[in-house]
Amino acid sequence: MMEVNTVNYEFLAPTTIRAGDVDAINHLLRQLTDNPVPIVEWQLREVCEKSTLCVARNVEGRIVGMNTLTIRYIPTGKVGLLDDVVVDESARGHQVGRTLVSKLIEHAQSVSVNRLELTCRPARKAANALYEGLGFQRSETNRWVMKF
């Protein structure tokens, strides 16, 4: 069983991507969504260049959790969008998700984001409880999506 203090957290940069990171992230994506589109190394590097990708690594150095913060500037302010929060099944129940989200909240505050937004399916009860426990409030705004 994994202990919380054996997990290291880092903001992944294009220059800090390790062998096996792409495979580990694809493994996480399969746990996040029913229809994952596999990511390849150049795409991971681009994500790291344009967003803040926080990862959790176990003692072997394998990524066991991740989340992403993207910042956008709009007339109503500087907005952070939290996406792709996922913890590997082997690491759940050890505060990894809470720590990942907390790290990105701290980062968003450090760069003066006005608000932080995220979406979460109602069926993800543990994730919704986590966000509420960290101070997020449910928005009454409908979120509309157009897929291509």
Image: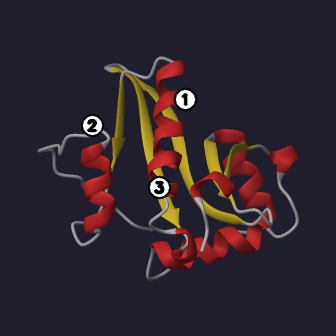
Q: Is residue 10 left or right of residue 125?
A: right
- Do tag 3 and tag 2 residues touch (Cβ < 8 Å)? no
Q: Please tell me whether mark 3 or mark 2 is closer to you in this view.
A: 3
Residue carrying label 1: 107
Q: Residue furthest left?
A: 140
Amino acid beneath label 3: Gln
Secondary structure found at label 2: loop
Q: Residues within 10 Å of mark 1 (few under 14, many from 20)?
A: some
33 w.r.t. 141: above or below: below
Secondary structure found at label 3: loop
85 w.r.t. 118: above or below: below
Give the mark, 2 or 1, whose residue is nearer the N terminus.
Answer: 1
Residue carrying label 2: 135
Instruction: Give the residue displayed 32% in from the left and 53% down from the top.
Output: 130
Quarter placement of the N terminus: bottom right
The picture quadrant where one finds residue 116 is: top left
The span from disc 1 to disc 3 (Cα, nearest Å) is 18 Å
In front of the other: 72 or 131: 131
Q: Residues within 10 Å of mark 2 (few under 14, many from 20)?
A: few
Secondary structure found at label 1: helix
Residue carrying label 3: 95
Amino acid beneath label 1: His
Q: Is residue 74 left or right of residue 30?
A: left
x and y, in percent, of residue 126 in the image: 30, 64
Q: Residue furthest bottom?
A: 34
The span from disc 2 to disc 1 (Cα, nearest Å) is 16 Å
